[in-house]
């Protein structure tokens, strides 16, 4: 919360989307907002806090939309996003309080939407998001379509990890090249290789130019 306010020049965003497993992220952000308000550093309205979960494990989303103060254990939790696979968040009541107090909401997205978010972020921004972070891309699109987010809103999506920890999330059929093979071009993340885009790679010199001079 402090870092967001400082990095945005103390002009708070309109909404903050956070991938919510155990819930400590949203709890911490809301706590920071309350502390900064008490210090006189910021004023209300606070950013709307949005808890994003996977459809295969969404106890917070279910509790929020059912108007409950605590979440119930989610049976058979399953999702590609390991950080969201938390059937019963310990701080569920605090997460729900933060969401409601800021006028936020809770959204669940499918694994298919999460994987699509990984590919979209790779193509558009050149970043390899973890599945938890990619869930925010899908959630933001849906909230925009539903009117919860407006075109002019300043929205923060908090990616919590690198996709390098989840290499199986984006299967890419890459060939094993021999040293004399040409390098193929990659169309985009997860799209495989383009035969039409092959280019001749420069041959490395057998000996570095400055070898033996020092």
Image (cartoon, rainbow, N blue to C red):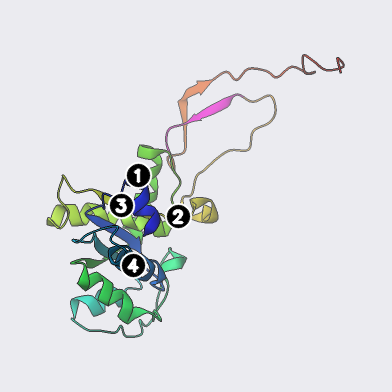
Residue linked to disc 3 = 156
What secondary structure is found at the residue carrying circle 2?
Answer: loop
Q: How many marks?
A: 4
Q: CA distance from mark 3 to mark 1?
A: 17 Å
- Count neighbours of disc 4 (C-alpha within 10 A) and say few if under 14, some if 14 to 19, many if 20 or more: some
Image side of residue 69 versus residue 193, left or right:
left
Q: CA distance from mark 2 to mark 4?
A: 30 Å
Task: Point out the tag, 2 or 3, that comes first from the N-terminus.
Answer: 2
**Pointers 4 and 3 in contact (CB under 8 A)?**
no
Residue linked to disc 2 = 130
Residue 48 at least partly seen: yes
Observer-nearest residue: 214 or 143? Answer: 214
Residue occupying image coordinates x 51% and y 23%: 198
Is residue 183 inside the magenta stretch? yes
Residue linked to disc 4 = 35
Task: Point out the tag, 2 or 4, that comes first from the N-terminus.
Answer: 4
Q: Position of residue 47 (x, y in %)?
A: 24, 59
Task: Point out the tag, 1 or 4, that comes first from the N-terminus.
Answer: 4
What secondary structure is found at the residue carrying circle 4?
Answer: helix
Does 102 sit above or below residue 196?
A: below
């Amino acid at each position: 919360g402090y870092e967001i306010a400082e990095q945005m020049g103390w002009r708070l965003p309109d909404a903050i989307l956070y991938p919510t497993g155990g819930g400590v992220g949203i709890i911490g952000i809301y706590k920071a907002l309350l502390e900064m308000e008490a210090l006189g550093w910021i004023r209300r309205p606070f950013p709307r806090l949005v808890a994003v979960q996977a459809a295969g494990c969404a106890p917070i989303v279910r509790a929020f939309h059912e108007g409950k103060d605590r979440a119930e254990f989610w049976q058979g939790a399953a999702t590609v996003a390991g950080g969201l696979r938390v059937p019963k968040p310990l701080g569920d009541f605090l997460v729900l309080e933060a969401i409601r107090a800021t006028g936020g909401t809770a959204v669940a997205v499918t694994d298919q939407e999460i994987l699509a978010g990984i590919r979209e972020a790779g193509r558009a921004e050149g970043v390899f998001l973890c599945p938890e972070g990619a869930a925010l891309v899908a959630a933001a699109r849906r909230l925009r379509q539903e009117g919860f987010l407006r075109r002019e809103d300043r929205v923060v999506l908090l990616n919590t990890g690198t996709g390098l920890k989840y290499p199986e999330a984006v299967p890419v059929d890459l060939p094993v090249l021999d040293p004399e093979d040409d390098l193929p071009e990659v169309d985009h993340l997860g799209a495989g290789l383009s035969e039409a885009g092959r280019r001749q790679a420069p041959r490395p010199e057998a000996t570095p130019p400055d070898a033996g001079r020092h």
